[in-house]
Image (tube, rainbow, N blue to C red):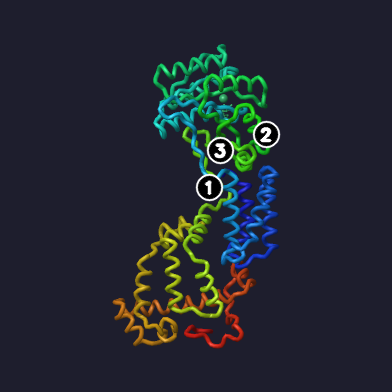
Amino acid sequence: MPLDTLSDKLQMSLRRLTGRGKLNEKDIDDAMREIRVALLEADVNYRIVKKFIAEIKEEALGERVMKSLTPGDQVIKIVYEHLVALMGEAAVPINLKPGGTSVILMCGLQGSGKTTHAAKLSNYLRKNNNLRPLLIAADVYRPAAINQLVQLGKQLEVEVFQLGTIVKPQEIVKKGLQYAKENNLNLVIIDTAGRLQIDEALMQELVDIKEIAKPDEILLTIDAMTGQDAVNVAASFHQQLSVTGCLLTKLDSDTRGGSALSIRYMTQIPIKFIGVGEKLDQIEIFHPDRMAKRILGMGDVIGLIEKATENIDEDDAMKMAERLQKGIFTYNDFLDQIKMIKKMGSLKGLLGMIPGMGSQLKNLNVDEDQFKYIEVAISSMTKEERKNPNLIATSYSRKMRIAKGSGRPYQEINALTKRFEEMRKQMIALGGMSEDDMQRVARGGGIPMRAPKAKKGKGKNKGGFRF
Ligand SMILES: Nc1nc2c(ncn2[C@@H]2O[C@H](COP(=O)(O)OP(=O)(O)O)[C@@H](O)[C@H]2O)c(=O)[nH]1
Ligand SMILES: [Mg+2]
């Protein structure tokens, strides 16, 4: 699993916040400290970390979180949004020359994945952009390098242009471009030599090749395992060549992943592709949002939080919580809840987003029609009954009347009222819980069985029922 360290650490610090009813400044401070350490340990540049934490903290202490019913979730969402912004918000497409011959120049340190990704890209763009590729072998310093490209080309059935190791790379590129023209190939990818370190002679060679080939895209391959140094490497290549995109390789390896966060922010070079394995189809477009979800290891949770915040009116939810705290839960409230769940999409879809539930759901048959029946049954109740469930709970004649009115069998209505009563007890117990109770439940303890706090001076509830 890639990015393990960072994602584990972030998850740990954020998980403590989820499901919490209220957060105070100390909770936020603690979480920020842990996030800070996790980012630094993952080799994210300290300047970024500092700015990142300052921004998240400010937002986390803001109204959006403090007034929210689910403050922990809101903090996670803020961290997520800032991660996405840090990595450039949206995917940046590769530059191609429509109607002409597109030229891509690969550059990067030795072993960073230039040759492998030149081949991967030729295949990817042939498939997805309908281009006819030619690979040019311009790494003449090691015979093995040319061989490697030739082999990869064979596997993919992509033509490789090579003139051995004697001709200068500049010359090979000129001839290769000519060859592409003559053979009606409209995508040229130039594989170049790398050094272990940035090197003047090598840079000059790349500058020459850039001059000759006028590439539409200069792709810098960076090994994601490089750590802090990735930014320096990217910056020096950028300074000499004005790199147009970055290809982050080996994200499948045991990398700490910090480079993905630092490169875009520190150098402004957009990450365009990622390499996620040695196989030739293991290349993907870089999507900042997907990467952020991957780093947080909470893709599904983020989706759920986004969906919930999109569709649920916090005021409505707050009113509901207040009613529960007063010990009120009526059939009207039940109906409101069903409406909320429906707004969030299907129940099955919703459950499927909860981590760990996905696989279990395959065997579970959620009957979405149940909601319809419940709604029909409730609409057959009188106004009084809806407000005061006790009227129905023990009355055979009322249940019978509701059964007839809704066209459902008596047994179903009877079962519904029983389930409702159980649910009501639980809801009210939860609604009246203190922070300590909540944490006890979260640790696996039961729901404390005691009456909820009575609100002073409010007198009797109108309609609702109080334990
Ligand atoms: N696991 C993994 N290995 C990669 C990836 N990209 C390249 N490699 C390996 O890294 C090594 C160096 O890659 P190469 O393309 O020769 O780097 P170059 O020196 O920049 O041309 C090779 O053994 C590749 O198989 C990747 O995304 N994932
Ligand atoms: Mg190579």
**SS at circle 3:** strand
Residue 232: give its label.
2
Residue highlighted by disc 3: 271
Q: Return the disc, 1 or 2, that comes first in the chain's sequence.
A: 2
Residue 289: give its label.
1
How far, Cα to Cα, is label 3 from label 1?
A: 13 Å
Residue 355: give its label.
none
Residue 237, percent from left and from top? 63, 29
Q: Return the disc, 2 or 3, that comes first in the chain's sequence.
A: 2
Amino acid carrying label 3: it is Ile
Q: Quadrant of residue 234?
A: top right
Question: Where is the N terminus found, in terms of image quarters?
Answer: top right
Left or right side of 72 for 421? left
User: Which class describes the residues within 10 Å of circle 3: few (<14), some (14-19), or many (20+)?
Assistant: many
**SS at circle 2:** helix
Residue 205, percent from left and from top? 61, 19
Q: Quadrant of residue 288?
A: top right
**Which residue is painted at 47% across and 34% down in the image?**
281
From the viewer's perspective, is residue 229 above or below residue 103?
Answer: below
Residue 429, percent from left and from top? 55, 77
Comparing 177 with 453, the one in front is 177
**Which residue is painted at 67% across and 26% down in the image?**
198
Amino acid carrying label 2: it is Asn
Residue extending furthest toward the top:
166
